Amino acid sequence: MKRRWRALRDALNGPQDLGRSPGFWGVFIAATIGLLLYPASGSSFGLSSLVSFLLYVPMALGLGLLWGYGGILSFGQSAFFGIAGYIYGLVAGNLTGTPAGTIVALVAAIAAAALAASIFGYFLFYGQVSGWIIPLLCLVLTLILATFMGQTAGYQWRVGQVLLGGYNGMTNIPSLRAGAIEFGGTSTALYYLVVVVTLLLYLGLRVFVNSRYGHVLVAVRDDPERTRMLGHNVDFIQVQVFALAAALAGLSGVLYASWGNYMNPSTMDLLAATLPVIWTAVGGRRSLLAVVLSTVALRALADSLAVSGSQYAFLVMGALLLATMLFFPGGIIVSVARAWRRPSRTRPGAREAVEPKGKGEVA
Amino acid sequence: MGLDVLANLLYQFADNMAFLLLAALGLMIILGVIDVINLAHGEFIMLGAYLTALSYNWGHLPLPACAVVSMVGVGLFGLVLERTLIRRFYQDKLGALVATWGVSLILSQGILIVFGPSMAAVPFPQWTLTVGASSFDGYRLMLFGVAVGAVAVLWWLLYHTRIGVQTRAAMQNAEMAACLGIRIRRIYLLTFAAGSALAGLTGALYAPTTTIVPLMGTGFVDVAFITVVVGGGANPIVGALTSAAVLSVISAPLASISGTFIGRIGLLVAALVVIRFLPQGFSGYVRDLQRRRMGAAAAP
Amino acid sequence: MTERDGRPQQSERLLRTVALTKSFGGIRAIDRLDLGVARGELRCLIGPNGAGKSTLFSLIAGIHRADAGRIFFKGEDITRLPPFRRVLRGICLKFQTTRVYRDLSISQNLLVALALRGPERRDGDTAGRLAWALATFGLDRDGDRPARELPHSHQQWLEICLALATDPDLLLLDEPTAGMTPDETALTADFVRRLNGQGTTILVVEHDMTFVRQIARAVTVLHYGRVIAEGPLAAIEANKDVRRIYLGEQ
């Protein structure tokens, strides 16, 4: 038992993420307890807001894994968010009589996202294309999907009894339901689901990146050619991570549909596509922890700015992205953490080392 | 009857090819020379459209003059952007992608804040051409002429001027060219400005054909990106022409049968298939063929 | 292993190339090259600069595709196989310039190389051999040190260990002692001899004749992408053609 505990602790505390000291874990546990106790004192609006921040964390973690650890820059995670959201709506909407209908829909949605990504990824990675092609084509995918779904108004655009809804989107999507528990938008049930999912996902991915596979992934990022020469099927590994990231984006999509009971094409458009990139870049894509923190923080910031109009929120996001790329290319949280650990070795404005290798990797 | 069908197909082809060429050319030359993708390209096109709308509706300038204003305006903007931002990312090509996406957001949302959700329209010149039973837009045919003309001007610049030779040298081997005294920085600056000006021109030319809104750039970039991916950066002219031609041949029939969106999806599928087998695009493939021919000729 | 005039017998050949050809642009780097390496050999490839030695290695490892000709490994035609499948079949190349994962630690580097070998494939031999190699080169302590902090020679040695970790039947070493001091060169030579003694077939490209003398029994000389001489070292050193190419003698 003690050996298992030590193995788990080693796996969690591997070198691939920030925060390994007992102090960190103390804060982590305190924050977790805080989150779990929040419903006792929080308003239903507060709960719903927190849910709307946390439900994007799986998508952000997926991109962090794909870009920060895998070296593959994707501008199209929103495409898989949307695919899963819509598939969930279609399947759940058609299975309203069935008890486990929403669960089937959840599985179908995530599977669809992963499948789409695998097929798309096959063409991207087995061709061993230049770095810039991947983010571009991913962006094109999400744009085309958004435009396509935007013109699916009208009764002829339906599957079974569910209308796709065109520009206004799909409405009346049933929330996830397990037995008697309904995970609806303002429910405590959804809150706990999202918190637990986020927690388990973060911890699980932490173990994952410190595993053997995680190290091979980082090797693929740093020098794909070299990794081929050590016997690894790099193209296949890249498709796998791409599909995993898509599945995580899909999970966020389903949670979103369950939270808001609607799904619309704007979740896949140009503005929506920028968001996961901003969250991971601004926080620091090479640390899962940084990704989680910056996603929640930036979602909260965007929400408060959106009160005056979403264009201000996006303007600030764009400026943040630009500023990060210019002054904190490794990410703000990551840079702060590095400076904290080695205060004597910080030079103001120091830039991270450039690593030109790898498909779609940015310094 | 046969003439009608043929004329229709040719018109569709010319219309599509013009759109692809004009949307992608600016991006292509920046990629070919500097090896950088400007993700704000769509917003540059949008700026061109806005400048034209402003010059036409407030400046009361005739359309050709508006186009010049757009070209110069966006070209200057590109010049400034290159000097302040883009040149910091020459060693980090993918960082340039992300940074220019930030610029794209700032531009589209900034224009939205300043000018609101829409802009006064620019009227569409009604030059109708009748062949048999069908009528065609003379304006769109003119766009085809402009697109081809732009490629021709580019070709002349690259192959018949001194700065063109220097640019081609910089494309082949920037370090070597710098050692020979070629001012790479200046070439990159001019190239980026030229690419921006082309984007501005595209915006000006297509302003009469569409509603002018802050996010209109998206309608151009998905097609522009596909064209650039399929063409490849090895040779902007060969790449742009072959890519636009092939993609038009694919999308024109698809679009006329099933609508614009199926046409675009067809383009994406085509792009995926092309890069799977020709990862450097058409121009890269042509370049490899030339190299292989050299190798075969070298047999002792 | 039987040898006649330094040429391995057909049936015992681990690696065989037939009329291998490769050009880069206008330059023919490898020209209808026939090469055979028997199991258990320790062979050196020498030749003037530009003779095609590194290109030959990259063709065998699969980094470049041959324009013509075939490569056979353990009797199987691997000419069209991608590099990673060749590694899985037992060929591993140590690059000319060091290419370790600079930001990963020594143990992380090794983890990547070993990651293929699940518990069932990792036999005691491989683990033992790797441990011996790490100990020989002094890489068995300080596993958390980032690879970029290692001195050049240690990076070279780490590369050899990474290649060993893939459990190769054929090890290709491209200039393993480049940039090493004479002591380090001698250590490497001793290691290579011992490794070969344990049964690994090793093909080495080298410029440093001291190193070649320390390890080689059989030598192949390349010139303009062709084999011009093959045999025991002494015979090669006395060979008129070889001397002419290297030293310009009449």
Image (cartoon, coloured by chain):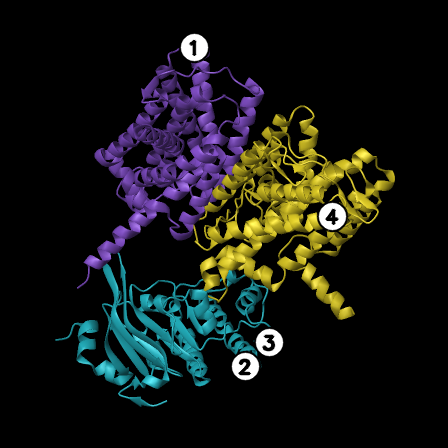
- Relative to B163, A277 lies left or right: right
The yellow chain is: A
Q: Position of residue A26 (x, y in %)?
A: 78, 52
Chain designation of label 4 = A
Secondary structure beneath disc 2?
A: helix
Tell me the kind of residue under disc 1.
Answer: Gly
Q: Which residue is mark 2?
A: C125
Q: Judge whether residue C39 can be spotted in this image.
A: yes
**Where's the N terminus of chain B, which quadrant?**
top left
Tell me the kind of residue under disc 2.
Answer: Asp
Q: Evaluate whether label 2 is on the same chain as label 1.
A: no
What is the C-alpha distance between the residues marked 4 and 3? Answer: 42 Å
| Rendered shade, chain C | cyan
- On screen, residue A347 above or below B293: above
- On screen, residue A10 above or below A269: below
Q: Evaluate whether label 3 is on the same chain as label 2.
A: yes
Who is closer to the viewer here, A77 or B167? A77
**In this rendering, the label closer to the viewer, 4 or 3:** 4
Dot 1 alpha-carbon crowd within 10 angstroms: few under 14, some 14 to 19, many 20 or more: few
Secondary structure beneath disc 3?
A: loop
**In this rendering, the label closer to the viewer, 4 or 2:** 4
What is the C-alpha distance between the residues marked 3 and 1? Answer: 78 Å
Chain designation of label 2 = C
Q: Which residue is mark 1?
A: B59
Q: Which residue is mark 4?
A: A101
Chain designation of label 1 = B
Q: Which residue is mark 3?
A: C120
- Relative to B262, B19 lies left or right: left
Who is closer to the viewer here, A36 or C211? A36
Q: Position of residue C196 (x, y in %)?
A: 43, 82
